[in-house]
Image (tube, rainbow, N blue to C red):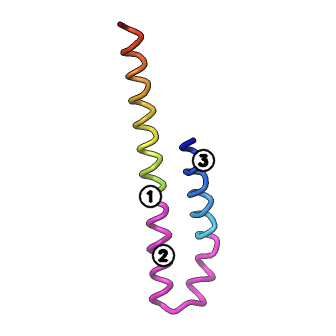
Amino acid sequence: MRFVWLAALGVLAVVMAVFTPSVVRTEPTLQAIAWLVMLIGAIVFIAVLIRVELLIRRLDRQLDSDASET
């Protein structure tokens, strides 16, 4: 379930990256900078979500292995 949201955000980041050259060429400087900030923010947010997902899975595995030992 969590990977569905991650995939959707990944698609959004890819679409933004595809349109970035056009935005930088056609928009005023301030709007182009805002676009780049949003793109970087989306990529960082996706990286954080991936890290959280991996930590949650590791914690789930540790809890499952602790429960099976008792």
Which one is in front, 34 or 24?
34
Q: Determine contact: label 2, label 1, CB under 8 Å.
A: no
Give the residue at mark 2.
36
Tell me the kind of residue under disc 2: Leu
Q: Earlier in the sequence, mark 2 or mark 3?
A: 3
Q: Tell me the quadrant of the picture where the C terminus can be found.
A: top left
Q: Earlier in the sequence, mark 2 or mark 1?
A: 2
Q: Which residues are magenta?
A: 18-43
- Residue 27, percent from left and from top: 56, 90
Q: Is residue 11 above or below residue 65?
A: below
Q: Secondary structure at mark 1?
A: helix
Tell me the kind of residue under disc 1: Phe
Q: Is residue 26 above or below residue 12?
A: below
Main SS, magenta region, reads helix
Identity of the residue drawn at 38% across and 23% down: 62
Give the residue at mark 1.
45
- Mark 2 vs mark 1: give the one in front: 1
Q: Give the CA distance from mark 2 to mark 3.
A: 25 Å
Give the residue at mark 3.
4
Identity of the residue drawn at 45% across and 82% down: 33
Please tell me how many numbered marks the rendered image carries: 3
Q: Determine contact: label 2, label 3, CB under 8 Å.
A: no
Tell me the kind of residue under disc 3: Val
